Image (spheres, rainbow, N blue to C red):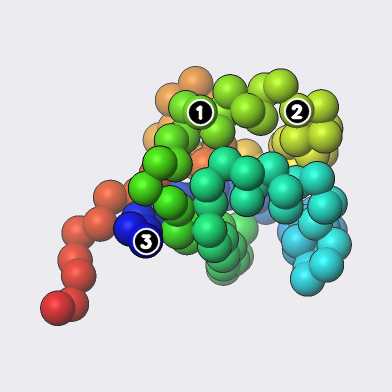
Amino acid sequence: MEVRRYCLTCDLKDDSILIEKYKSFHAQGKVWPEIIQSIKDSGILNMEIYLIGNRMFMILEVSKDFDFNKKAQMDSKNPKVKEWETLMSTFQKPVEWSRNNEKWLKMGRIFKLN
C-alpha cells in the first residue's frame, strides 16, 4: 500500500491553562470516537501531534487516495466534526503567516536523510 506523509503546523493561544486543557482533550482515549472515525474514513492511516510551547506539529500518514479537499467536504457535512472544530478553535490560533485565518498549514520538506 502506498503511503504518503504530510506535516502541518498550528499554534495554540499562548495561555498555559488553555494549553493544558487542549492537551487533555487529546489524551489517549479522550478524543471523541466520532472524530477518530471521521479521521479514519477520510483515508488518514496515522496521525501524531507534537507540541512545544504553543506551537504544534502534526504528522499525517495517508492512503494514496486521500485528498484534503475531500476531507474538508466530509467534515463540513459532519455535525460532530463541526462541533469538535468549534471547540478546538477556542484553543487554536492561526500562525502569523496564514492566509484567511487557516489553522493547520501544510509544511514543505527541506531535507531528508537517505
Q: Can you tell which mark lies on residue 78? A: 2
Q: Nearer the viewer, mark 2 or mark 3?
A: 3
* Chain-order first, disc 3 or disc 1: 3
Relative side of 13 to 20, left or right: left
Q: Is residue 74 left or right of residue 63?
A: right
Q: Residue 70: image x %, image y %? A: 51, 28
What is the spatial separation of the Cα atoms under label 1 and label 2, in whole angstroms?
Answer: 13 Å
Q: Residue furthest left?
A: 114
Of labels 3 and 1, the one closer to you: 3
At x 82%, y 34%, the residue is 80
The residue at the point 57 percent across, 41 percent down is 42
User: Mark 3 is on which residue type?
Assistant: Met
Picture disc at residue 1: 3
The image shows residue 56, relative to residue 93, as above or below, that is below
Q: At 72% across and 52% down in the image, what residue appears?
A: 36
Verify CB contact (< 8 Å) between mark 2 and mark 3: no
Callout 1 secondary element: helix
Label 3, secondary structure: give it: loop
Q: Which one is nearer the viewer's eye here, 69 or 20?
A: 69
Which residue is most to the bottom? Answer: 114
Instruction: State which quadrant residue 105 falls in.
Output: top left
When asked about the image quadrant of residue 111, the answer is: bottom left
Residue highlighted by disc 1: 70
Q: Label 2: few (<14), some or many (≥20) within 10 Å? A: some
Horizontal and vertical percent position of residue 46: 54, 62
Residue 101, image x and y in percent? Answer: 54, 26
As shown in the figure, which amino acid type bears the numbered disc 2? Asn
Q: Quadrant of the N terminus?
A: bottom left
Disc 2 from disc 3: Cα separation: 28 Å
- The answer to whether 89 is drawn above or below residue 39 in the figure is above
